[in-house]
Amino acid sequence: MDQPTCQTDAASGNPFREMAFACVPALVLAIAFLALAGHRKDYLGHYAAGFGATLAALLVTDWTAFAGERPRGRPLVLVALCLACVGGGAFLEATIFRLAVFDEVDFFNQSLGAALAGLAVLRLPGGQRPGTRLAGLSAAGLFVIAGVWFAFAR
């Protein structure tokens, strides 16, 4: 008897379960940031903002470009967009959020969040259901809000 894969289990479950598979690892890493680097809450902020913003960009692209399909080019498009989000994070770090100099640690943390969001979306089936869209954008929004909050916390 064939065992169902995680992909099948997540796709057949409810929308919040699908997004939990994407967001729980990110939340665990966020807790690790607090536990290991709690004195530098901006590390957590950059990580969470990178995860949330990239998750939103990837999910919206996935829903609009690959609705109901799983074409061969989907992984390549999502990886390219994830890299573009990392580039966008570098641009923001070097321009708008630059207080004194480009901070490589902040850039690394937001890139780590972006990469984890990329992995999370790649494991989801293409073209999500409306409930999954709501759950995904809600999670992305909460991560961005937490990111901004922690990035500027004193």
Image: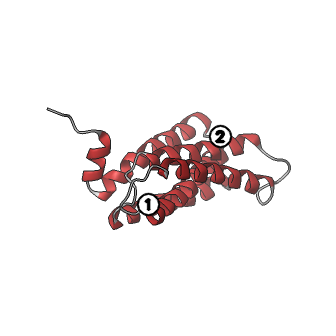
For disc 1, the neighbor class at 10 Å (few under 14, some 14 to 19, many from 20) is some
Give the residue displayed 80% in from the left and 58% down from the top. Answer: 95
- Image location (x, y in percent) of residue 109: 64, 43
Are there few (<14), some (14-19), or many (20+) residues within 10 Å of tag 2?
A: few
| Eye-nearest disc, 1 or 2 | 1
Q: In the image, residue 151 lies at what x, y percent?
A: 66, 53
Nearest to the observer: residue 154 or residue 112: 112
Image quadrant assignment for residue 33:
top right
Name the residue rendered at 33%, 63% in the picture.
129
Q: Pick the residue in front: 54 or 25.
A: 54
Quadrant containing the N terminus is top left
Q: Label 1, label 2: how many angstroms apart (C-alpha)?
A: 42 Å
Per the image, the residue denoted by label 2 is 39
- The type of residue carrying mark 2 is His
Q: Nearer the viewer, residue 19 or 105?
A: 19
Location of residue 152 (image quadrant): bottom right
Residue 145 visible somewhere in the drawing: yes
Label ID, residue 66: 1
In-image side of 119 versus 16 (left or right): right
In this rendering, the answer to whether 88 lies above or below 33 is below
Mark 1, secondary structure of its residue = loop
Numbered disc 2: secondary structure: loop
Image location of residue 66, percent across then percent down = 44, 60
Residue 97 is left or right of residue 43, and the answer is: right
* Residue type indicated by callout 1: Phe
Residue under the point 53% across and 51% down: 78
Q: Is residue 41 something one can see in this rendering?
A: no
- Kindly identify the residue that appears in the image at 66 percent across and 48 percent down: 42
